[in-house]
Amino acid sequence: MAASVLSIVGLAANIASTIITTINKNKNRREKRQQFTRSIVRQLSSQGYNAVIVAGPWRAWGYETMSEHCFEGVQYTLFAAPKDRLMIVENRGDGGYENWALCGSNWVRWGKIVKFHPHWNSQTMGTPYETRDQKDFPGWPD
């Protein structure tokens, strides 16, 4: 498992570095941050991971790895786990793509809480990839 965590951290660092160097220098700061957050989670997702990146306070459970990335003077925390694993991440700060983004499979959002499921049962879980009211969040695992 340690080798797996190290490989995800290395992969995330590589992806972040590549994205940072390719972001359009002519965009304003907010657009660059939006491009950064969306690009990094998309790249990790294409490598088989569910991913969430958050600027500011957060709460997380079930992630395999967590790494820190600074972009445009903002500190981001990136969470990743294989797509066959349960992971929950809450953004306790501001919303908007410049402050957080997510990508992966079998997820549902309750406001600023996202839960990735290892598999989906539409009869008991409803519709995947939807945003529900945060007050209806079923709770964190013990």
Image (tube, grey):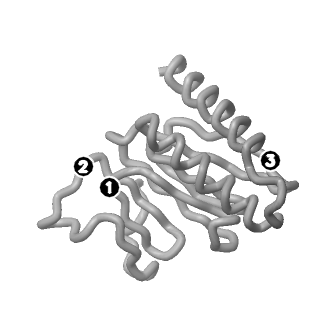
Question: Which residue is label 3 attached to?
Answer: 70
User: Which part of the image, by quadrant, shows the C terminus?
Assistant: bottom left
Q: Amino acid at mark 2?
A: His
Compared across the picture, whether 124 is left or right of 90 comes to left
Using the rendered view, name the quadrant where residue 12 is placed.
Answer: top right
Residue 131 in picture, x, y percent from top left = 40, 75
The Cα atoms of the two marked residues, 1 and 3, are separated by: 28 Å
The Cα atoms of the two marked residues, 2 and 3, are separated by: 33 Å
Query: In percent of the image, x 60 and y 65: which residue is there?
Result: 91
First in residue order: circle 2 vs circle 1: 1
Element carrying mark 2: loop
Query: In percent of the image, x 42 and y 69: which residue is there?
Result: 109
Question: Which residue is label 1 attached to?
Answer: 106
Compared across the picture, whether 78 is left or right of 74 comes to left
**Label annotation for residue 119:** 2
Query: In percent of the image, x 83 and y 54: which residue is there?
Result: 25
